Amino acid sequence: MKIQVNLYGVFRSVAPSPSFSREAVEGTTVKDLMESLQLPDTVYRMALVNDIRVKEGTILKDGDEVHIFQPVGGG
Amino acid sequence: MKIKINELIRGYSGSVRTSTGKEYTGIDLNGIRRVAAEADISTRAAEIAALKLEIIPVRYFRNIASLGIAGQARLLSSSVAVVGAGGLGGLAIELLSRLGVGKITIIDGDRFSEDNLNRQVLCREDDIDRLKAEVGAQRVRAINSAIEVVFHPIFLTEENAVELLSKSQVVVDALDRISIRIVLEKVIGELGIPMVHGAIGGFLGQVATIMPGSNILSALYGGDAAPSARGIEALLGTPTVTPAVIASLEVMEVIKFLLDRGTPLKDEFLYLELENAIFSRIDLQR
């Protein structure tokens, strides 16, 4: 299956491009995707799948669009 | 009385020529003060009365082509609360004062410290250890004496929030922790007023207008998916430029809401990566 990945902020530079389409096997979770991208786990990772905030255990489906970013809370 | 006020305003108004040669009928700061004193009304009421006569207080002239005379009068009749008077809040207070928002409420229990000097526009070297809310109120009065400013040198809590915010039409979220922002979001749901969320970390920032009950922040940060109380700012700090950009966008959201114009950032947030000049609008479904 194919998923669209968009990376933001400090995750932008971990892949050659911050926005790309990627093949994934059935059953791949958001966490599996984050680990395969080697996103640093020292930063809290947040994901939206098709514009809905999801937990890392969420199983991805063909055609899903995933945004991965980090919380911003300073003032 | 109304006739007398209008006569006074006309008497103190005159033709004003701008540096670019434009001419308009205006009334300067001194004229507004005289009208207020002679008619025994506030300077804010004098400014609103002048605008109703299409006589432009000179201090707002450069706003008028974009905001309109009616828009400027509406802002002068509006009430905005700013929660947090630090990096974001200080700049929001500065902009709201110059914009001419009629009533500003400032809430912050903190005092300035030396490491605020890099970005907090209200903080000068002499202000270290002073209450941020009090310095903010002084700044408002110094910039625009027509504004009614109220300050509360206390931290917002779930217990005091409804009382502190109940007289405002919109709240600017200029807090510095995710957990208290979620509390604010809950409270504005109870009050039925929107909040404009802004947050910074490093050269990253985000902005959203949160309508009561839409609970965008608890969708992002709440429940099992809760991050620690602090976000990326714990790692990247809060450098000089970021608050100015985000606070400006927050005040723009306030303008859009108060004047019912433009396209507010509702059910989405703007995520800014200043270092790469990338601004993304990210939709968020509940």
Image (cartoon, grey):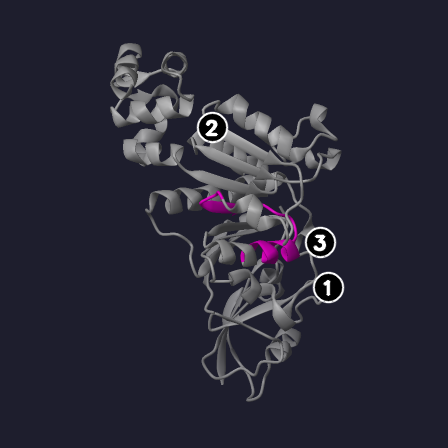
Residue B277 is tagged as none
Residue B147 is tagged as 2
Q: Amino acid at mark 2?
A: Ile
Q: Are marks 2 and 1 on the same chain?
A: no
Provide the residue span drawn in magenta.
B167-185
**Mark 1, residues whose alpha carbon is within 10 Å: few (<14), some, or many (≥20)?**
few
Secondary structure state at the residue bearing disc 2: loop
- Chain under label 1? A
Q: Amino acid at mark 3?
A: Leu
CB atoms of marks 1 and 3 within 8 Å: yes
Q: Residue at the location (35% across, 20% down)?
A: B58
Instruction: State the residue in front, A50 or A14.
Output: A50
Secondary structure state at the residue bearing disc 3: helix
Q: Residue at the location (32% across, 36% down)?
A: B71
Q: CA distance from mark 1 to mark 3?
A: 9 Å
Secondary structure state at the residue bearing disc 1: loop
Query: Whole-percent x and y of residue B36?
Result: 39, 17
Which of pointers 3 and 2 indicates the residue nearer the eye? 2
Residue B235 is tagged as 3
Residue A42 is tagged as 1
Quadrant of the rendered image containing residue B51: top left
Quadrant of the rendered image containing residue B57: top left
